Amino acid sequence: MIGCFYRRLPAEGDGPAFSPTDYTRSNWNPELQHGSPALALLTKLIEELSAGSGLRIGRLSLDILGAIPVTPIRARVWVERPGSRVCMIAAEMSADRDGRPARAVARVTAWLLAVTDTADVASDRYPPLVEGPAEPLLAAFADAGGYFDAINWRPQNTEGQSAAVSWFSSLAHIVDTEPTSAVQRLAAIVDCANGVGAVLDPNRFVFMNTDTVVHLHRLPAGNDFALRARASVGPDGVGVTTAEVFDRAGLVGTSAQTLLIQRR
């Protein structure tokens, strides 16, 4: 690992505080955070709160509530809907605004479900993906710095196919050198589906996602993940990117993102 996305700050008041590093900086605006580190951090807090419950994450839903600045942020995590078989946990980060009251800038809600043994009936919709040689990465992402210095993005040759495929590995811890789970490592890259499945030229269009929703029928493993993604663009400035999510063993789930599309 080459560093981390966040450094833990001394606790003041309710909830933990974190300082984002340069590895959180977005390609759309270097003064703002990319969505993936925020999703990863809030997922970490949800997993920490649910540890030992016998439940595991089945769905993660990130809503970006406003521009996430590259400045110290505060976080909180709580049980929204308690339950021994089905439980919802939410985590939120907020940022100060030039002396004005802090506002929430990102929220993740997670459905957690009770774990039972269904190995004898387990099935996947698609066969595993096998990584091939990496294709060149678009300059708009290769030269972006910030967040993209903290991941290893390996586009694949998908000529003649209906969707684009890229493999990813995270190169950074989420917080300092604290242990990082496979779900957190996946959360740190899955927001990139928007870039993988892009059908618009990023030099001509901005296509920012307002959310990222991930469903996991199987927990991921390792630190290598593939996204097979494709965007659809509507006639009125709204789009959607959908993706299948894989680890080395095969399909682990799906993701979807709502896009705001604007001409530069």
Image: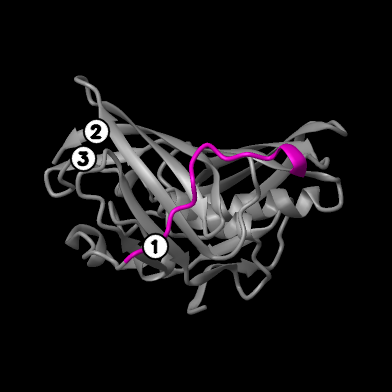
First along the sequence among labels 3 and 2: 3
Q: Give the range drawn in magenta.
A: 119-132
Q: How many marks?
A: 3
- Res. 192 visible in picture: yes
* Label 1, label 3: how far apart the Cα atoms are: 22 Å
The residue singled out by tag 1 in the image is 131
Residue 54, position in %: x, y? 85, 45
What amino acid does circle 2 point to?
Ile
- Res. 103 visible in picture: no
**Which numbered marker is on residue 257?**
none
What amino acid does circle 3 point to?
Val
Determine whether 186 is above or below 10 in the image.
above
Residue visible at 61% across and 50% down in the picture: 42
Q: Magenta includes 124? A: yes
Q: What element carries label 2?
A: strand
Residue 249, position in %: x, y? 56, 57
The residue singled out by tag 3 in the image is 199
In the drawing, does residue 29 fall left or right of residue 68?
A: left
Residue visible at 30% across and 68% down in the picture: 133
In the drawing, does residue 134 fall left or right of residue 60?
A: left
* Label 1, label 2: how far apart the Cα atoms are: 31 Å
What amino acid does circle 1 point to?
Glu
